[in-house]
Image: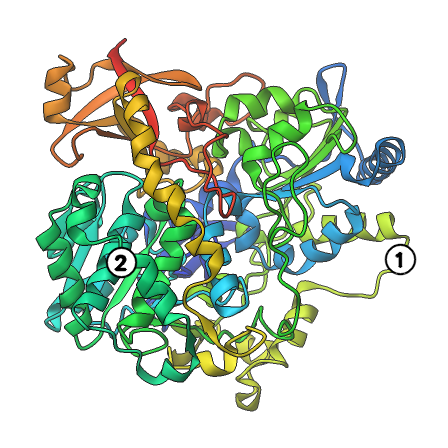
């Protein structure tokens, strides 16, 4: 048989935030090989195991290929015309009967990796005519956006570490060696971290677990879960007491320095050391070292965000970088200048924080949505505004949101549910209609969101490599058609490429003629240069000033100081604190249907400190029950010195053991869902973000 003549296609991986460049060899509509693109100016040939799995998703026979309708509990294939007609008719009927907010939407993480979704979701959500919007953002990153909003005037104006030039990097509750960066798009992260050390710099990690990143670092400190804000307050206290404040080129823009100094006075290293679990002398030395380094940056992520004080942590992270002169400064916390600028035309728009409050729990509305932690409440609680219908788009909140079992039960009560997805999974099985979407190699690719978090300015566009299979439609085609039918408007010919071209015409690089045609002529991507100081022109506050100490945060400090006193009672019944962890070969729940990512031994274990396990007479590999106020799960124990005492860790994104799904590979290695024991009542009260980390639990042999 003659060998197939292969062709090569270049694009960015769309699975995680890293934007790794791919070199895809293909023939006759099938992938032959996926390699790292050595000519990509950003990722430089780096590749992680997840990217190779794009081949599996493209060829997966379990991918949905036709619209499905549930009839008497059985799935039946229907036409797109019938699907669109019924979805629009049911939505309109339910809203006419119960009011506009009886319809809700949930937007999953993969939408952020999809140019079509990024450009067509906003008009679709407006067309739904409801304020009941939810997304994975409030289970992940909301504290970052709220801090940017209150301090800098825009939720997407988020600083990222200038990792390629820093002399000192402090990582609080982050594990970029596994995540490839998070709210910090940094492909080839290991080489970037090692380069800090090669040029004589230093990396310090603060984490309740000695993570993969911590093992590479120069120094690691175990910290008690949810005490990160106390640590940051104490470090800022040291800056004032040791007269180490240096505001740099932003000095004339920074307000409320005295207010912050007064607020941190109470939080000396000696005063917080016991609660934080780090010696006062170490806290003091860390703050001084960073202040005296030629450049330094504090980066805090999931462990500091998805907890009870995520809002305070992200505010204090920004404040520390500002006070050490490392804000908008080379080697510090800097601001990307993306070619597709999400902030274009946003100056002067009103702050949406707390514009509405959720009906049942009064949680704050922000950035066009409510916290997902209260979605089940809004479905279960009767009364005006009760959610009766739901559309989910590329999301699996039954596994990814706090209190997943409660959401699972709530979805079964809905009068009508629609899902746009590629799989029949733990969430979409509740739908009445599923609309099958193209994904990965079948869609256009430009990273709208992650260029806004990138540690270097680049731009790259790739047309779809393959046609969608069966009757699949691209997400934007589905969203556009539903929008036209809901609004009764006429198609104006818009497409992701048309919108991309328009947005590029507003960019800071328009004089360099960065347009769609130029991007097509440069399939490896365009290098637009390292991060440069640019905050003065991008600042979005009404008065053009940086708000160092918003009352919004100052007023939350008493909640922090009283928190640990109240925890003493809980610790008697539930002596351990639970934290999540990410795995190299896993990202979201949908990635588990790739055989190459789940092969091997079961990675879904509970990691326990060896001394803690000995006191409980638990042995390695033994099945144990982890019990919280919310439920219990059973999984194997993994004994390790890498866990801090009194802390356990379970990976997120698993739990594929439910019936009526069709993800066979995932079901063979199902693991458990950590969110069967997390508590949707535990949130960061400031932002509404879910507080996964720090859940109180107890452990007993199964």
- Measuring from the top left, give residue 15's x and y in whole percent: 45, 50
Residue 564 left/right relative to 340: left
* Element at label 1: loop
**Which quadrant holds residue 358?**
top right
In this view, the residue farthest toward the bottom is 511
Q: Residue at x 65, y 73 (%)?
A: 348
Q: State the count of labels.
A: 2
* Coordinates of residue 665 in the picture (x, y in percent): 44, 27
Q: On the image, numbered disc 2 is attached to which residue?
A: 265
Q: Is residue 174 visible?
A: no
Provide the secondary structure element on which disc 2 rests.
loop
Q: Residue furthest top?
A: 702
Q: CA distance from mark 2 to mark 1?
A: 59 Å
- Which quarter of the image is occupied by the C terminus? top left
Q: Which percent across, then down, holds residue 697?
A: 32, 22
Please name the residue that numbered disc 1 is placed on: 489
Residue 666 spot, x, y in % from top left:
44, 28
Question: Residue visible at 30% across and 32% down?
Answer: 565
Residue closest to the eye, 257 or 473: 257
Image point 50% across, 83% down: which residue? 537
Density class for disc 1 (Cα within 10 Å; few <14, some 14-19, many ≥20) is few
């Amino acid at each position: 048989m003659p060998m197939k003549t292969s062709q090569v296609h270049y694009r960015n991986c769309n699975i995680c935030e890293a934007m790794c460049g791919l070199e895809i060899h293909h023939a006759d509509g099938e992938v032959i090989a996926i390699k790292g693109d050595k000519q990509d100016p950003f990722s430089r040939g780096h590749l992680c195991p997840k990217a190779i799995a794009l081949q599996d998703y493209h060829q997966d026979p379990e991918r949905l290929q036709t619209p499905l309708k549930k009839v008497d509990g059985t799935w039946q294939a229907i036409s797109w015309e019938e699907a669109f007609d019924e979805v629009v008719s049911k939505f309109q009927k339910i809203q006419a009967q119960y009011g506009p907010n009886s319809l809700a939407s949930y937007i999953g993480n993969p939408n952020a990796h999809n140019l079509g979704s990024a450009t067509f979701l906003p008009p679709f959500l407006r067309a739904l005519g409801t304020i009941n919007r939810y997304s994975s953002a409030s289970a992940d990153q909301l504290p970052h956006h709220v801090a940017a909003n209150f301090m800098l005037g825009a939720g997407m104006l988020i600083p990222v570490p200038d990792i390629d030039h820093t002399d000192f990097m402090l990582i609080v509750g982050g594990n970029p060696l596994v995540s490839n960066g998070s709210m910090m798009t940094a492909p080839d992260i290991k080489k970037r971290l090692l380069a800090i050390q090669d040029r004589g710099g230093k990396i310090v990690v603060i984490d309740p677990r000695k993570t993969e990143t911590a093992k590479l670092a120069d120094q690691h400190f175990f910290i008690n879960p949810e005490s990160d804000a106390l640590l940051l307050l104490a470090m800022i206290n040291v800056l004032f007491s040791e007269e180490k404040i240096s505001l740099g080129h932003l000095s004339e823009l920074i307000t409320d320095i005295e207010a912050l100094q007064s607020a941190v006075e109470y939080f000396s290293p000696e005063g917080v050391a016991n609660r934080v679990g780090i010696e006062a002398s170490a806290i003091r030395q860390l703050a001084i070292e960073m202040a005296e380094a030629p450049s330094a940056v504090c980066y805090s992520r999931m462990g500091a965000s998805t907890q009870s004080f995520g809002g305070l942590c992200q505010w204090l992270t920004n404040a520390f970088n500002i006070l050490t002169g490392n804000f908008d400064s080379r080697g510090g916390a800097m601001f990307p200048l993306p070619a597709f600028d999400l902030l274009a035309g946003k100056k002067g728009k009103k702050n949406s924080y707390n514009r509405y409050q959720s009906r049942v729990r009064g949680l704050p509305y922000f950035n066009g949505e409510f916290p997902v932690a209260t979605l089940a409440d809004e479905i279960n609680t009767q009364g005006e505004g009760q959610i009766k219908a739901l559309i989910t788009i590329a999301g699996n909140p039954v596994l990814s949101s706090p209190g997943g079992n409660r959401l699972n039960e709530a979805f079964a009560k809905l009068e009508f549910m629609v899902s746009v997805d590629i799989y029949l999974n733990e969430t979409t099985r509740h739908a009445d209609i599923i609309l099958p979407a193209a994904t990965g190699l079948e869609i256009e690719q430009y990273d709208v969101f992650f260029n806004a978090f990138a540690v270097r300015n680049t731009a790259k566009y790739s047309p779809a490599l393959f046609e969608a299979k069966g009757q699949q439609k691209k997400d934007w085609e589905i969203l556009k058609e539903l929008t036209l039918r809901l609004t009764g408007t006429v198609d104006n010919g818009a497409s992701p490429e048309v919108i991309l071209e328009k947005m590029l015409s507003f960019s800071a690089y328009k004089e360099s003629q960065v347009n769609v045609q130029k991007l097509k002529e440069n399939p490896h991507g365009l290098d637009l240069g390292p991060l440069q100081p640019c905050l003065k022109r991008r600042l979005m506050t009404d008065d053009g000033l940086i708000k160092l100490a918003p009352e919004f945060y100052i007023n939350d400090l008493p909640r922090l100081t009283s928190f640990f006193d109240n925890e003493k009672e809980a610790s008697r019944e539930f002596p351990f604190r639970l934290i999540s962890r990410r795995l190299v070969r896993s990202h979201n729940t949908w990635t588990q249907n790739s055989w190459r990512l789940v092969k091997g031994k079961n990675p879904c274990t509970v990691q326990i400190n060896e001394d803690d396990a000995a006191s409980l007479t638990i042995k390695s590999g033994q099945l144990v029950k982890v019990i919280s106020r919310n439920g219990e799960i059973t999984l194997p124990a993994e004994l390790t010195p890498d866990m801090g005492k009194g802390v356990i860790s379970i990976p997120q994104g698993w739990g594929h053991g439910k019936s009526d799904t069709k993800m066979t590979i995932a079901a063979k290695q199902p693991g458990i869902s950590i969110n069967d024991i997390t508590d949707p009542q535990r949130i960061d009260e400031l932002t509404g973000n879910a507080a996964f980390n720090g859940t109180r639990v107890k452990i007993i042999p199964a």
